[in-house]
Amino acid sequence: MEQQGNGLPQRLKAATRELHARAERSGVMADLLSRTVERGAYVALLANLRAIYGAMESLPGGLLLPAALARSAALAADLRAFGGTAPAVAPATLDYVQRLRSLHGADAHRLWAHVYVRCLGDLHGGQILGRLVRELFGLDGADGTRFYDFGDDDRVRGLRDALRLQLAALPLDPAQADGVVAEAVWAFEAHCRIFEQIRRSPA
C-alpha cells in the first residue's frame, strides 16, 4: 500500500531493517524462532513484554496506543495459562520502561517509534509465532497465545494499514521526524539487549 504524507513509515523501515533482522537473531527470540526455547525462557519473554506494554498503555493521556493494539491484558492471561510466578524482568527491560516514561513534553513524539517497533512487529509476525508457540508447548485453543491474537487476517491487515497511515499523517517537522527514526533505532537495539539478557537469566 503506497504511503502518503511525511514518509515516516518508509524511513523507519529503511533505518531499522538490519536491526530488525539482528533482533530476530538475538537471545531468546532466536531460540523461539529455531524452536529450541525452553518453557521458562518463554515465560520470561512474556513477562518482559508485559512490562513494556504496561508502560506503553499507562502513559499520560493514553493517546498513542489504539485500544485494538493494547496487549498487556492478553500477556497477563498468557502468563496465567503457563502457570507459576512470573519472573522478574531483565535490567534492559527496566531501562526500556524508564525510557518510555521519560519521553514527554517536547520529546513525546518519539514515543511513536515504540509503537512502530512493537505493534507493527507483533502484527506482522504474530500469527506465525502464535502457531509456533502452540506447537512447541502443546497448547489448545487460544490459552497461552492471546498476545498474538488480533483477529482474522483481514482485521490484521486493516490494523497494519491504519497504523502506517497514522504514522504517515503525524504533523512532524524534519527534526522531529529524525528524532522518531533515531528512537526506533534505539528501541531495536534495546530489544536485542533484552532478548540476550532473558536467554542468560536462570529459568
Image (spheres, rainbow, N blue to C red):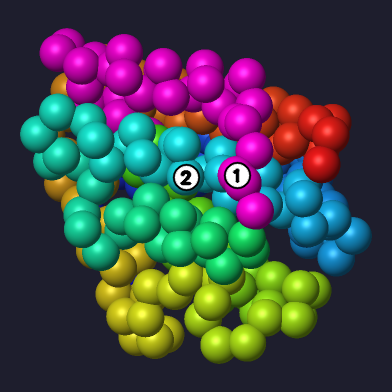
User: What quarter of the picture does the C terminus occupy?
Assistant: top right
Residue 72, x across and y down, in percent: 38, 51
Q: Quadrant of residue 100?
A: top left
Q: Position of residue 42 (x, y in %)?
A: 71, 53
**Horizontal relation, residue 168 to residue 126: left or right:** left
Determine the residue located farthest toward the right in the rendered image.
Answer: 36
Question: Magenta stretch: dominant SS?
Answer: helix
Residue numbers of the magenta segment = 84-113
For image coordinates 45% across by 55% down, the residue present is: 76
Asked if the residues shown at circle 2 and circle 1 are in contact, with their CB atoms under 8 angstroms apart, the answer is yes
Q: Could you say which disc has been placed on residue 86 in the image?
A: 1
Closer to the chain start, of discs 2 and 1, is 2
Q: Residue drawn 61% across and 22% down?
A: 92
Q: Amino acid at mark 2?
A: Arg
28 or 123: nearer the viewer: 28
Q: Amino acid at mark 1?
A: Ala
Name the residue that disc number 2 marks. Answer: 50
Mark 2 neighbour class, 10 Å CA radius: few under 14, some 14 to 19, many 20 or more: many
- Pick the front one: 103 or 186: 103
